[in-house]
Amino acid sequence: MSQRVYITGLGMISALGNTVSEGFLSLSQSKTGIGKINHLTTRYKEEFLAGEINLSNKDLADLVKDSNPEYNRNTYLAMIAAKEAVIHSGIDTKDGLRTGLISSTTVAGMGITELYYKELFEKTDHLSVIDTHDCGYSTERIADYIGNVDYVTTISTACSSAANAIMLGCRMIKHGQLDRVVVGGVDALSKFTFNGFNTLMILDREWCKPFDENRKGLNLGEGAAFLVIEGEEALNKRQGKPLTEIIGYANANDAYHQTASSPEGYGATLAIQQALAMSGLNPSQVDYINMHGTGTPNNDLSEGMATVAVFGNQIPKFSSTKAYTGHTLAAAASIEAVISVLSLQHQTIFPNLNFTTPIASLNLTPIHELLKTPINIVLSNSFGFGGNCSSLLFKKV
Amino acid sequence: MTKAYINGISCISAQNTIDDSWYFDTITPANGDYFSAIEPSYKDHIAPNLIRRMGRAIKMGVTTANLAIIDADAQKVDAIITGTGLGCFEDSERFLLAMLDNNEQFLTPTSFIQSTHNTVGSQIALIMKCHDYNFTYVHRGFSFESCVLDALMLFEEGKETILVGGIEEHTPNFVTLNRRALKLQIQDTTMPIHQSTSNGVQLSEGSTFFLLSKHKSDKSIAAIDGIKTLYKPKTSEDIFEKLIVFLKLYNLTLSDIDVTLMGFCGNQHFDKYLNELLPKLTTNTAIASFKNLCGEFYTASAFAMWVATKLIQKQQLPQSIVIAGSEPKHIKHVLVINQYGGVNYSFMLVSQC
């Protein structure tokens, strides 16, 4: 159970760009990917902004060279990011070591189901949609795309999904079930999720303003991010190079409400405290927190309360990067894990955009200008519907 | 890896498994090409104000979770792990149709809120006020298997009492679409399911929960020794080799297995590898099927584990599920070999404790 686990490969496609390096460039320029909606078909196209990837489904099919395209956006995004991570890590899945794939999604194939659902009862043209609707479909496509995968599974715990995929990957390595795992999450924009969040009245019509007193809600985004994580034994065997160590993780439940977070952030507090306890660190050793920070009145207050509960009057530097990517739901935690690794590699905090006024009851000010600063430990939070709260701790190598 | 003791079980399926006294006596046939779950009166199990809003998957899940806890006489749980291939399909479909019918207007959030796959797990946590580990696996024929593997790892990490369950629901539209895609077929019940020459399955649904404990007690009915999943094995020989290796982990060989429960689904193509395995298994063990009773769905393996647990508890192999081999004198080790769609294969070993 003592084996260390390292991140050795990164892959990301989001509104910030189609690769990790494109994403890094946008982040370093404090440039948001959120803007006008071009590709998603919705009557609200002109009314809302979103963190949309500027590629059509056909463009994406071409990128993954799909010979029999069914234009399932979710699946293509996942394939692109997972492949980038595998190539970046330099692992060879045919070398006899056990490779796992743990993906996560909430929307799954809904983005294509919603286009054809009614005609499925009349025509037979798109009946294959019922094979691509479920969450496992995209995972199996990624598994076949990477090749030689020994274990596959998929997690869906709403907006904390990818954090749980990363956590499970670490645990499977520590338990000796796998030598390395490709972990991450994906969610493409769909009319279904868009309308769902709209009925909950938590979408901001302007650019979202995480941790601002006048925040009105979130901007939805889409994307996929995958990380290759390896046990130190497998890494040493191939003499690979670690990017970051994962030193703590925890999963707790708020058990307060199906969609809202408890006002005091009880579940979030538990997740952060348990991740810290696992790492053996004191709260004061955390240099930077990449917050969940969606920009909804409820989340940011609740997360802020949890931060105060854990860190008292020594609040680490923090920011939310949701104003760059939009809230990418199941992919959010893996996108933010990639951003956390970039922060550690470049010793840089990417600023919280659109911030002007601290939340009055908390008086917490995020980093809102690009900051070069020594960073050794990053905490990343992800919370979701159903009270799911997960925290991850990354350490510079 | 540590064993997991099964201290409580509860199952809603196409058979009357929700009635504690049912033991394969009255078999309910399929309704043509699909089975519906035999559901209890939920008002005995869930507060009336909650029942109204819950979809069937949630009602089935919350009820069986609660009954498994009662069966085990457990006071609290340290983790809630659910598996579901399709999640709350009824709520997803309701929101989807409302959105399409009304051109994205006049929508209410309830069915969207309940459409997320982790709704059952989080409702259980909400009702129990459980702030601990909460996970939902959504991978096709590995959804329930992933839960069991996770629980076994959590016991090694120090958890003591874990609730695991597999939940699936279907809707009339979902049955219709599967039928239109030629995935369903009425089975000839005069022949055993493994000899079926059909190209379809009988779709079904249900919810099965297990209250697992790290410690053996007078409540322990059986123990889960281990689990293994195989994604797209290349041949049946490949599956057989991995099965031998799997059993060896527990110092067992095929001759130690008293009953093997095999996931024949009736689709001759999906059942091909299991049929090829059959002659290699029959010399030592009684072979039984279970999908002729529970139908096919992503978490049918949870029903299989319920059957395995019951066989060990009752020490009697019902003739309605036997497809080959002779009745064992004693039922000590039950092996489940499942397949879903000829893609997801799994082994689960349940033993007397």
Image (spheres, helix red, strand yellow):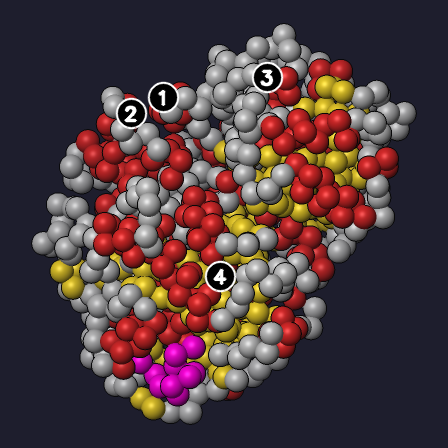
- Which disc, if any, is residue B180? 1
Mark 1 and mark 3 lie on one chain; the one further toward the N terminus is 1
Numbered range of the magenta stretch: A341-350
Residue B226 vertical placement versus A358 (above, below): above
Horizontally, is A53 left or right of A152 in the view? left
- Which disc, if any, is residue B196? 3
Question: How many residues crowd mark 4 within 10 Å: few (<14), some (14–19), many (20+)?
Answer: many
Residue B331 vertical placement versus A170 (above, below): above
- Mark 1 in CB contact with mark 3 (< 8 angstroms): no
Residue situated in front as seen by the camera: B269 or B130: B269
- Mark 3 in CB contact with mark 4 (< 8 angstroms): no
Determine whether the residue tagged by mark 2 lies in a helix, strand or loop. loop
Marks 1/3: CA distance? Answer: 21 Å
Work out whether disc 1 and disc 3 sit on a shared chain: yes
Determine whether the residue tagged by mark 4 lies in a helix, strand or loop. strand
- Which disc, if any, is residue A124? 2
